[in-house]
Amino acid sequence: MIRGVIMSETYFVTGGAGFVGSNFVRYLLKNTAARVVVVDKFVRTGSWENIAACEKDPRFSFFEVDTADGRALRAILRTAKPTKVVHLAGETSVDRSIDEARIFMKTNVGGAFEVAQQCRQVLSTYDDDKLARFSFVHASTMRAAGPVDANGEALGPTSPGAASALAAESIILSYYRTYKLPYLVVRSTNLMGPWQSPERLLPLVVARALTGTTIPLYGDGSARRDWLFVDDYCSGLLAAAKRGRYGAVYELGRGEPLSSREVVAKVLAAVEAEKPAAKNEAMQLAGYTDYVQLVTDVDDRPGHDAAYRTVSSAARDELGWRPQKSLEESITKSVRWVLQNQPWSQHIVEQSGWQGERLGLGIAPMDSEKRIAAGSPPSNRPIVP
Ligand SMILES: NC(=O)c1ccc[n+]([C@@H]2O[C@H](COP(=O)([O-])OP(=O)(O)OC[C@H]3O[C@@H](n4cnc5c(N)ncnc54)[C@H](O)[C@@H]3O)[C@@H](O)[C@H]2O)c1
């Protein structure tokens, strides 16, 4: 608890029960004196457990709300009168976006519009001082820019999820350009850290290693990504909310991209250091002696982005942002958290109904068994569910 400080800012955080959201809420409560008002609908990865501990802090309040519900958002915004909005609610899994594009459009595009619009309306009730302190940060991803071609030019979105992310960014930036509102965007690449969905690469690799089951590596494992610890993304969001240039698109990256084969190897090395394969009963029962033996190449994701070009110079120069954690430290800390929180992971898996099956092949759930039996569609043919 920070004492003797005037509580001047109020943050309104959407998606605050998700991976980034819950980390960001904790980051705010720890590093600022702000009040934090959170909304979330508990969709799949979002869970009350992720933020339950924040309830002890009197500056924290929570509302179970869908970002599509303009009336509910308006009521909360009118009462809370936030000075900062950080929009994190969204559907984020690329694989799921390939299978269930509609919900991505509804949540990511419709949700961004509704939150942006309701904020615009509440701003009309603000006095000049409060208006001058207001900013709206939209959390986005490098997928919105898309992969780069041989000349380093970004090609645009390659999946429905990425398209919805770019559409959401466009809505936010249009509010800056049209209404001159203090709205901006912060993109990042891949994140790791506590409370990350068990469907994501790092927690998935750890869980599979623990249980001695195969670890799927998409394509030839050569897709490259830059990785950040989630707190480093949170510090970027906070810096952008405090001093970001309105209408800007900031990109956060470490500048050390790794291939997915390399990152899986590093994660497995971190698991080995904490729980050696030789002492893992599940590995012995499955007949494996080394975690690396679990890695299995599988068909690539349709439209899998090979690499992004993350330009973080504006974030570094204008926001003074720098990642604080090295890659090795980020991996070790994330792996330890997953190892120590398996009951949480199991609960999230049960809540989402995911049973470890391959997602993102573009197969409608109703037809999936038939299609799997028929084999994967050739990559140059349209994928029709
Ligand atoms: N995870 C990453 O690697 C990463 C990287 C870069 C950017 N981001 C961005 O950060 C944001 C959050 O990502 P995340 O990884 O925390 O995702 P997440 O799935 O863990 O969290 C999303 C949260 O949004 C909530 N939500 C979904 N639909 C909602 C709705 N209709 N109304 C209210 N709440 C709803 C969910 O309940 C969940 O709590 C996204 O915008 C994403 O693009 C994430």
Image (tube, rainbow, N blue to C red):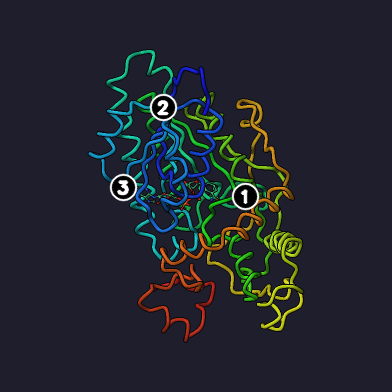
N-terminal of the two: label 3 or label 2?
2
Mark 1 burial class by Cα count in 10 Å: few <14, some 14-19, many 20+: many
Q: Residue at x 56, y 63 (%)?
A: 342
Disc 1: which residue: 308
Depth check, mark 3 against mark 1: the one in front is 3
Identify residue type, mark 2: Thr
Secondary structure category for the residue under label 1: loop
Q: In the image, what residue type sits under mark 1?
A: Tyr
Q: CA distance from mark 3 to mark 2?
A: 20 Å
Between 127 and 176, the one lying in front of the other is 127
Would you name the residue on which mark 2 appears? 10
Query: Which is more N-terminal, label 1 or label 3?
Result: 3
Residue sticking out furthest to the top? 128
- Name the residue beneath numbered marker 3: 66
Q: Position of residue 13 (x, y in %)?
A: 42, 37
From the viewer's perspective, is 287 left or right of 363?
Answer: right
Sequence-earlier tag: 2 or 1: 2
**Do tag 2 and tag 1 residues touch (Cβ < 8 Å)?**
no
Q: What residue type is disc 3 on?
A: Asp
Q: CA distance from mark 3 to mark 1?
A: 31 Å
Check the image and name the residue furthest to the left. 71
Local secondary structure at mark 3: loop
- Say what secondary structure mark 2 lies in: strand
Residue 177 drawn at (x, y percent): 40, 28
Q: Is residue 189 left or right of residue 258?
A: left
Whole-number angstrom distance, CA of label 2 to CA of label 1: 34 Å
The 10 Å Cα crowd at callout 3, few under 14, some 14 to 19, many 20 or more, is: some
Q: Nearer the viewer, residue 179 or 149?
A: 179
Q: Nearer the viewer, mark 2 or mark 1?
A: 2
Q: Is mark 3 within 8 Å of ligand 1?
A: yes
In this rendering, the answer to whether 359 lies above or below 18 is: below
